[in-house]
Image (cartoon, rainbow, N blue to C red):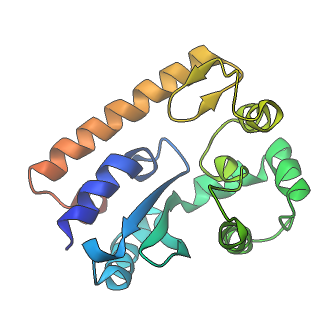
Amino acid sequence: MCRHLEEGLAFHCAPALAGIKPANLISCAKADCPNFAALVEEYNQALNSRDIYFQVLSQLERSYLLLVYRRRQLSAQLERPEIAQLLSEAGYPTGCPLAAQLERLGRRLAEQKEGFPHEIGLFLGYPPEDVTGFLRHGGKNCLLCGHWKVYAHPEQARELFRRYDKCRDALCRRVALGMSISQLFQAA
């Protein structure tokens, strides 16, 4: 087990691990976990039966970009008509398995010279109106800035942010006590 990875997953991916968000993303430095691929495989073996999946979306010279997601929840998110439409407009295949959409997202990440393709927010559970608001306003003039930039329904977003923070804090405390992500969610 890589303690640094466990702590990073607890901090950055708690809402997806706990099932209150379809997915979270974490950047993992290669130097911190030299056996990263084996660890990802171990997490998948331990947690896929709980509908928790780990997938490397992109690999850079010094880091990996890891998506932690709930398969059923993410599939349902991407099948919502307004989200499917936005993804189709961004060149994603329609009516196909989640794996094909994640493959396309990985290619988009590889093509992107700086930052992230904006549609990644749809995979991470951001409301579609906030994703389109970000694009329309170039990241400016948001109503609230928290886990993402909010352009509609700031009170709902504020409550979600509060839940995400509470979840993160609880998971980080448990990991700090020596519990592993696999232990915590295999028994859940």
Identify the residue at the far left of this view. 177
Residue 23 in view, yes or no: yes
Whether residue 188 is visible here, answered yes or no, is no
Q: Nearer the viewer, residue 96 or 152?
A: 152
Q: Residue furthest front?
A: 113
Residue at figure coordinates x 78%, y 46% from the top left: 80
Number of residue marks: 0
For residue 72, above or below residue 11? below
Q: Is residue 61 left or right of residue 86?
A: left
Q: Is residue 94 left or right of residue 5?
A: right
Judged left or right of residue 32, residue 117 is right
Q: Nearer the viewer, residue 32 or 93?
A: 32
Residue 140 found in image quarter: top right
For residue 47, above or below residue 34: above
Q: Position of residue 156 (x, y in %)?
A: 59, 20
Residue 127, percent from left and from top: 69, 35
The quarter of the rendered structure image containing the N terminus is bottom left
Residue at x-position 10% and y-position 56%:
178
Q: Residue at x 62, y 55 (%)?
A: 115
User: Residue 35, position in %: x, y?
Assistant: 29, 84
Q: Is residue 144 above or below residue 169?
A: above
